Image: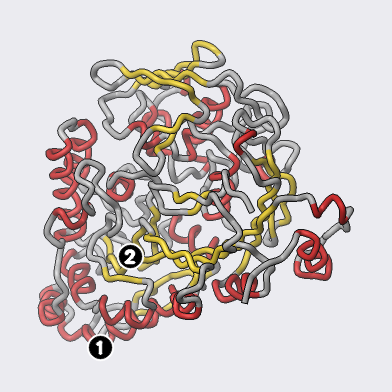
Amino acid sequence: MKKRMTAVFLVLILCMGILSGCVTADPAEDSEDRGITVAISSDTGTMDPAGSIALTYLAYSVSALDELLTYNEDGEIEYRAAESYEVNDDSTVWTFHLREDALWSDGSPVTSSDFMNTITRALDPASGSGYANYLFPIENAEAIYNGEADIDTLGVETPDDYTIVFRLSEPCVYFLDLLRLPVYTPSCSEYADSVDSGWDREPSTSLSNGPFCLSEYVPEQYFVLEKNEYYWNADAVSLDTITYRFFDDTQSMANAYEAGEVDVATSLSSTVMEAYEGEDDLFVTDQIATRYIYMNLNVEPLNDVRVREAVNLAINREELCQIVGSDTEPTYNLVAKYMKDKNTGEYFVDEAEQPFEEDVAKARELLAEAGYPDGEGFPELTYNYPTLEMDSDTAQVIQEQLKENLNITINLEAQELQANYSTRYAGDFDLCRMNWTADFADPYTYLSMLLSNSTYNCSGINDPEYDSIVAASNSESDPAKRSELLHQAEQLAVGEQFYIIPLYAMKSVNLVNPDITGIRQIPASGALEYRYADI
């Protein structure tokens, strides 16, 4: 049962109707193509690094865009768009020197103004960037975002085409980790003018500074990346193309892999683990991610901490995971279960007490104290979640458990993935499913989302004490003391104020053609990277 398909057969099948708009190519030309096809979830979000980022951008960017620098699997710096940097003694001025051999995919030079282009556009709230708050360590960035300062006061300087200087308002010990985020990556200033102009999905204007560039985009069907011949490290790139095909559900992805229509299928259901046990195709990794639920504090009675605690304590996460799948594990934290503390090598969440323990009896007492004995008088709330199999199963279990344990009614509203994002971002929900995969290898990637000024704070959290603790951790240079502050912040948010409902951690179940070599795992997120893959 091997999953093999040459490029010739793939083209023939696509032309027969799996994908629309196929143009028959020269078979001899196709036979020389070294390409892979990857199955991913439905088409969501923009491909503009200054815009509203979702799954499509994340798939595209790991192969098409070079950040200034990143960390490899050994925790060492890997220079990409930059070739060196220096920082002053108090870590408030960071100077990066761009490599002069870096070119966009049309052969034009990548300059400091292209990095500035993304930053300034992301600081315009109209762009809808959920990552804009990660620019706030820069002098005046937050004031600019809030319309309280002019863009020319921003603490970013570009003294020449190949130098970019960041001036921070205070020390930020994890600043290098932030550089892999979309808002710190470049967008070609000649074309990238707005999130609404469509430049990001048009191959002639969607330029790349990474190993691959966009050659075709068919909305809701697929997009194709081809090797960027102008890439500074092109000699290390073996593949000619990477085709990403969109699928609405994980079963369709698995079926496509089984039929040989795709070479890689990611984030599949736990049943795949059982079906492919012992096979070379099966590739299971730890996801540095947490599945949880946002509670809208602007909705009664979720503005009452006793109600929020009662709901958390009434959910049986072991039972939930048994039903949802063997690729899940209960979690009681916001910070991902599999995120490691870079200083100790241990899992961060294991270095402190669990924020809370489930207790149905106590949950009922808390609900009664809040004025709803045995659920009497409790309003019906609605839980919004994406129409994905795992989320549907999760929603039904939670609905049943809260009815049985607290006698409260939770209505379920399944939404298309993009609609679910939009609903959450607008704050138009009672309860809303949230999943966060780490963007960088630091607990701040999670804890920052609950800050009062966070662009991902969709539930009305405004906690000065929490903000103060997280702010103190930003400039704490002693690793042990900083870790203590981060644990303190999580305990306050998750174990005392119960701002979220953590549910489970996940394994990533993937199917990969055994002929593919060179796939790497991104240390920060656990996601797969294909830029130096071969087949």
Residue type indicated by callout 2: Ala
Earlier residue among tags 1 and 2: 1
Residue 181 relative to residue 302: left or right:
right
Look at 15% across and 61% down and name the residue there.
355
Query: Where is residue 448, by image quadrant?
Result: top left
Is the residue marked by circle 2 packed among few (<14), some (14-19), or many (20+) residues within 10 Å?
many
What is the quadrant of the N terminus in the image? bottom right
Q: Nearer the viewer, residue 462 or 491?
A: 491
Q: Say if 179 sits above or below 350 in the image.
A: above
Number of numbered discs visible in the structure rendering: 2
| Badge 1 vs badge 2, beta-carbon distance below 8 Å | no
Q: Position of residue 311 (x, y in %)?
A: 23, 73
Instruction: Report helix, strand or loop for mark 2.
Output: strand
Q: Nearer the viewer, residue 530 or 304?
A: 530
Q: As rendered, which of 5 and 427 lies closer to the eye? A: 5
Where does label 2 land, which residue? Answer: 505
Q: Is residue 414 visible?
A: no
Find the residue positioned furthest to the top: 159
Q: Which residue is mark 1?
A: 404
Task: Give how far across and how far down residue 440 sits, in percent.
Answer: 37, 44
Q: Residue at x 28, y 83 (%)?
A: 401
Check disc 1: other Cα within 10 Å, few if <14, some if 14-19, many if 20+: few
Is residue 239 visible from the viewing direction of this image?
yes
The amino acid on which the numbered mark 1 sits, given as a three-letter code, is Glu
Q: Please state which of residues 217 and 422 is positioned toward the viewer in this rendering.
A: 217
Task: Give x and y (percent) for residue 302.
Answer: 26, 66
Q: What residue is drawn where x is 58% and y is 57%?
A: 44
Distance from disc 1 to disc 2, alpha carbons, whole Å, reads 24 Å
**Residue 222: percent from the left, percent from the top?**
69, 58
- Find residue 233 and report its image quarter: top right
